[in-house]
Amino acid sequence: MDHSGHGMNMDLPPFTLGRGLEPSADPFFLIGCLLALALYGWGVVRLVRRGDKWPVGRTISFVLGILTVLLVMCTKLNDYGMVMFSVHMVQHMVISMLSPILLLLGAPITLALRALPVAARGHKGPREWLLWLLHSRYMRIITHPAFTIPLFIASLYALYFTPIFDTLMGSKAGHIGMMVHFLAVGLVFFWPIMGVDPGPHRPGYVMRMLELFAGMPFHAFFGIALMMATEPMIGTYMHPPASLGIDALADQEAAGGIAWAFSEIPSVVVLVALLFQWRRSEDREARRKDRAADRDGDQELEAYNAYLASLAARGR
């Protein structure tokens, strides 16, 4: 195959086409993102039409989450990510740490449970199957911290520091599978931590913060390991095209810096979201206690008035 670039648009890296991958927009992610937007929009419209409300902020968050996936998988970032480790690391960090947080803040499971119709007695529809899945043993296992934290860490070290990464990058299906894996790992890791949607595990706020910070330092260590390496470590990126004018080791150092710095971004976003949820939970609990105290006070007052009335009746 001719890799010289003759007859091709030089705005696009010819290496991408040479590896048998589609330029820019990946059809798998493009169709998946459009389908997700359509289903979410259907759910919101269904709620609105029956007079229910759905927070605008959740819709905005979900749409932004989808847009971040489109950004890294359906633009030229996807082309350059095939030959530049630094660009690939941007893709990895966004799709595994930023996209899942934004998608989960959109509460898609809650929306589905509210929008899907209840099946007739004795039958199971999509809503009933979703509830069954949420309460299944499988879901309890894959969302448990003992599973999600090691998986989150292994997705870095076991993938990049073994031949698995080069094998996956050698085919279109392998590349798509790897990026889907990054997104799925991010979703199951942040799902119980965010606590927006119902799930098998609902830890307290302190435990959620501990789960969050248990995984983040390993991203920093991974980035530092790449930055301190004295030679390129990933076979796929050892020989970048000369037309790009980049050095493989310098590009690897940039990738390590991205991994190291990016671990702070989701930590801050999730921490702010958790503190906001905690505050709202405390406010709701305080209002509940105030209402209970008011009811108790009214009952005591009524009992006291009844007692006075009984005394007056005896006096008469």
Image: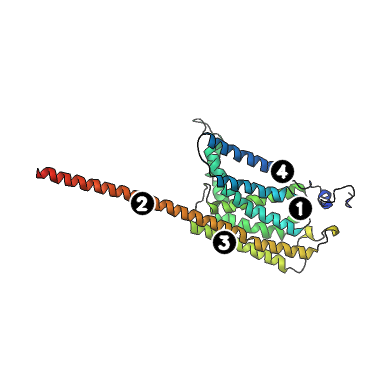
Q: Residues within 10 Å of mark 4 (few under 14, many from 20)?
A: few
Q: Quadrant of residue 268?
A: bottom right
Amino acid at circle 3:
Phe
Say which label, 1 or 4, has the lower sequence index. 4
Q: CA distance from mark 3 to mark 1?
A: 30 Å
- Residue nearer the viewer, 100 or 234: 100
Q: Is residue 30 left or right of residue 238?
A: left
Q: CA distance from mark 1 to mark 4?
A: 16 Å
Q: Residue at x 73, y 63 (%)?
A: 254
Q: Which mark is residue 213?
A: 3
Q: CA distance from mark 4 to mark 3?
A: 33 Å
Q: Which residue is mark 2?
A: 290
Q: Which mark is residue 169?
A: 1
Whole-percent x, y for residue 271 in the image: 55, 58
- Residue nearer the viewer, 30 or 51: 51
Q: Nearer the viewer, mark 3 or mark 1?
A: 3
Amino acid at circle 2:
Asp
Q: Residue at x 27, y 46 (%)?
A: 299
Whole-percent x, y for residue 307 in the image: 18, 46
Amino acid at circle 4:
Phe
- Residue nearer the viewer, 112 or 130: 112
Identify the image quadrant of the C terminus. top left
Q: Which residue is mark 4?
A: 28
Whether tag 2 and tag 3 are in contact, CB under 8 A, the answer is no
